[in-house]
Amino acid sequence: MRLRSRSAGLALLALAACHSAPPEQSPALLDVEEPLDLFAEPADEPARQALPAGCFSGIELAEAPTSLDSAFGGQAAPGLEVVRVVENSPAARARLEVGDLLLEATLPDGSRTELLWPSQWRALELEQAPGTRLGLLLDRAGREASTELVLEARSAAPERTASVRYREEQRAGLVLRTATEVEARACGLAPGAGVVVVGLSRRSPWRPAGLRFGDLVSAVDGLPVDDPQVLLERLRMAEDDARLSIRYHRPLAEAGQGFEAPREALVRASERRQALRDLHVPLLLRYTRKGPGRYRWSTLLGLLSYERTPAAWSLGFLWFGGVSGGDTESLVEVER
């Protein structure tokens, strides 16, 4: 009998000591405002079709696949991965293959462009004249090789790339959308570059700095935002007391008519507010915060407990008694 009592006591102690592992990701921000009219990207396809088409290379590129080293904080894999080669195109004649990594492009004047983002290749296609010979340094199955690609005049606009939304909820409280080709080129950027602010936390440090919904960010700390990851990485790496220099373009008052001259703003980096999540004293006290306005505490192995949510509360005692209350089905006028 004594052995059973001891075992029961040990089981109660073990149960009281159990607690869940802390979460590895922060909860979603609840105060992010996202205007409904910014959920869809602009209906600017006719304007996109009317843009100068530039040159044609016949390759479709994507960011290099994530390496094992970069996944654990090492340097990201360099280059752009060839994911498609159009038959009988300049790329096919240059003997490029799917899976090649383009590392560098050399212009006829000897200037070189390190290729990190797809927008950099699109800039070459738009800025160079038909017949331009590009020297390419590439990685094929771990070995460096080189080839030459001759650009041709493009007869039609490329396929439209759907916009992508990004949420940054640690250092700035932002929702960003990739800029459309019309938006990017109106701000002097290549397709794929620039991001549009489509959501802001009410406590975002970007608000007091003057930025607002619809602004297009083109540079951060002097670095061109050739890809949304440039801005997101800069935000992640910012020190707690850092001020980031943001270059942005504000749309003209009349929708679809372009952007104002670029502006500059200094914005602070923010951080998540901390709060007590769990307090546990075996056999005596247990407090758990379950979310905004949601918490529970109990004492003496549940002899007395209290739970609160935004809509109701409950008080329990002696494991079998209790009382609760909360909101009803009607409103009352608040007197001031």
Image: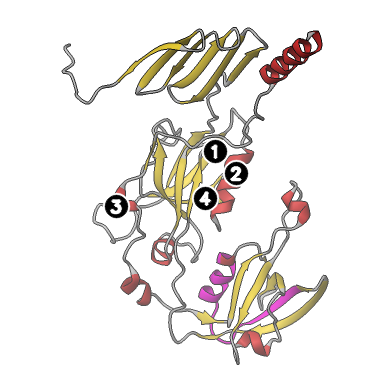
Q: Which residue is mark 1?
A: 244
Of the residues under marks 4 and 3, which one precedes in the sequence? 3
Q: Which residue is mark 2?
A: 234
Q: Which residue is mark 3?
A: 37
Of the residues under marks 1 and 3, which one precedes in the sequence? 3
Of the residues under marks 1 and 2, which one precedes in the sequence? 2
Q: Which residues are magenta?
A: 119-138
Of the residues under marks 2 and 4, which one precedes in the sequence? 4
Kindly report the distance in space between the C-alpha atoms of the residues bearing marks 1 and 3. Answer: 28 Å
Q: Crowding near pointer 4: few (<14 within 10 Å), some, many (20+)? A: many
Q: Nearer the viewer, mark 1 or mark 2?
A: 2
In the depicted structure, whether residue 206 falls above or below residue 284: below
Find numbered disc 4 in the image and state the secondary structure of the residue it sits on. strand
* Residue at the extreme right: 143
Q: Crowding near pointer 3: few (<14 within 10 Å), some, many (20+)? A: few
Q: Are marks 3 and 2 in contact (CB under 8 Å)?
A: no
Residue 230: x percent and y percent? 58, 51
Is 250 magenta? The answer is no
Residue 8: x percent and y percent? 73, 15
